[in-house]
Amino acid sequence: MFRKILIANRGEVAVRIIRSCREMGIPTVSVYSEADVNSLHVSLATESYCIGPKESAKSYLNVQAIIATALLSGADAIHPGYGFLSENADFADICKAHGICFIGPSGDVIRRMGDKAQARATMANKKIPITPGTGIIKDIKEAKKFCKKIGYPVIIKATAGGGGKGMRIVNEEKELEENMSLCQTEAQSFFGNPDVYIEKYLQNPRHIEVQILADKKGNVIQLGERDCSIQRRHQKLVEETPSPGVNKAVREKLAKTAIEVVKAVQYEGVGTIEFLLDKDNNFYFMEMNTRLQVEHGISEMISNVDIVREQVCIAAGLPLSVKQSDIKLQGHAIECRINAEDPDKNFMPMAGVIKGYNAPGGFGVRVDSHVYSDYEIPPYYDSLISKLICWAPTRQQAIRKMYRALKEYAIVGTKTTIPFYQMLIEDAVFISGKFDTGFIEDFCMRYADK
Ligand code: ADP
């Protein structure tokens, strides 16, 4: 096992990783920017080092500072969390070159799956269903021809995209050229790569993803599907497992396909296979995330598997601690991503001091967060300040528990999305389980009228 693990991340995910490491008896090193000196991840780690100023590019993305800190502190592994360097293939290679284990797949696998167009081509080769689409678009004539063939609407996507950024929906041919060049410019500025491709835009599908774990001995398991259809600007807000829109036959097919994807790329580590599910129960591979995901906690709650612990063990070369036949998915789990945002101002990010804080508790309630009373939310990073997860034996009970927990959750001094979720969780469409990725737009219109 590792001597010491450095966590190259901040906030709630760093706290989450430190917790599993502590339980495993592994000392941790946290790194932080000058703006994050008061974050819980700094005080919870065994050792903490400042690695740069507030700008992510000079701190959490500062590869030299992170590697130097790992070497000087004697850490022999780096957990990248999610975001930042977690899907950076060069970073994985650099860790290896310095004799540090990157807790994740190899640089080559990240490269292969991180490029969305390449991942789609790999899947098509293996007969995994993908949405109709192109490879990297070289010229507008080719794009027009393809879109005419499959019909509008289409979605232009950055091959290096992520986090809901670098995507544009196009409804008719006359909008295509302008959107393509805008998408290329955005792709270059966000991801340093201007390549884009085109996919058929499915009308209001569900976003369904499967959590997988694969060790270095060839064992692969899956922990069921998560429904992440409740999204705003292509970013997830509420996730639940199992999906209320997936029947037994589709569930089994999704799980089987996810395992096939893992085997097709000889994946090692924890990961997520994302699919879009249409109204006729057809599903299509969308992408693979080669890292821990924000919403992994709900799968932990129904499977009783500590995904971070398994991830660390996989990286250390140990076999998975559970077999597929040991996994009994039980009950229902829902997560609300609590963001420091003003839902009444188009979810504008809010910074500032949390003057009063009371997190909910009780049976089946889990709060993953790095904030506390008097904590100052820095304006430089993601607005996620807490993940509220509720587990109960049935979906209906999980919804009631979430409602109760949201009512208990007090964050004073800054606006958050808590009041928004209090309304969402009571919404008849949400409760019915019959929703898709168009839910939030529709709900916000109804919410604005209230
Ligand atoms: P990212 O990597 O930025 O998260 P994804 O490729 O996972 O982007 O897509 C994010 C969301 O965008 C999906 O969950 C879905 O709501 C929407 N989306 C992406 N591709 C399509 C498509 N072809 N048709 C309809 N919606 C799509």
Image: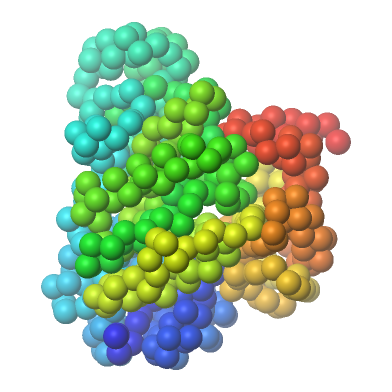
User: Which x, y percent locates residue 239?
Assistant: 59, 50
- Identify the residue at horizontal 34%, vertical 8% (top origin): 148
- Identify the residue at horizontal 35%, vertical 82% (top origin): 5
How many numbered marks appear? 0
Quadrant for the C terminus in the image: top right
Quadrant for the N terminus in the image: bottom left
- Identify the residue at horizontal 69%, vertical 68% (top origin): 364
Q: Quadrant of ligand 1?
A: top left
Residue 207 falls left or right of residue 253: right
Looking at the image, which is closer to me, 408 or 42?
408
User: Which x, y percent locates residue 118?
Assistant: 22, 39
Name the image quarter holding residue 312. Answer: bottom left
Q: Is residue 438 above or below residue 170?
A: below
Name the image quarter holding residue 153. Answer: top left
User: Which x, y percent locates residue 64?
Assistant: 25, 73
Residue 122 falls left or right of residue 35: left
- Residue lying farthest to the left in this orientation: 97
- Kindly tell me whether residue 363 is visible in this rendering: yes
Residue 12 falls left or right of residue 408: left
- Residue lying farthest to the front in this orientation: 325
Q: Is residue 340 above or below residue 80?
A: above
- Residue lying farthest to the right in this orientation: 450
Q: Is residue 38 above or below residue 401?
A: below
- Identify the residue at horizontal 73%, vertical 62% (top origin): 414
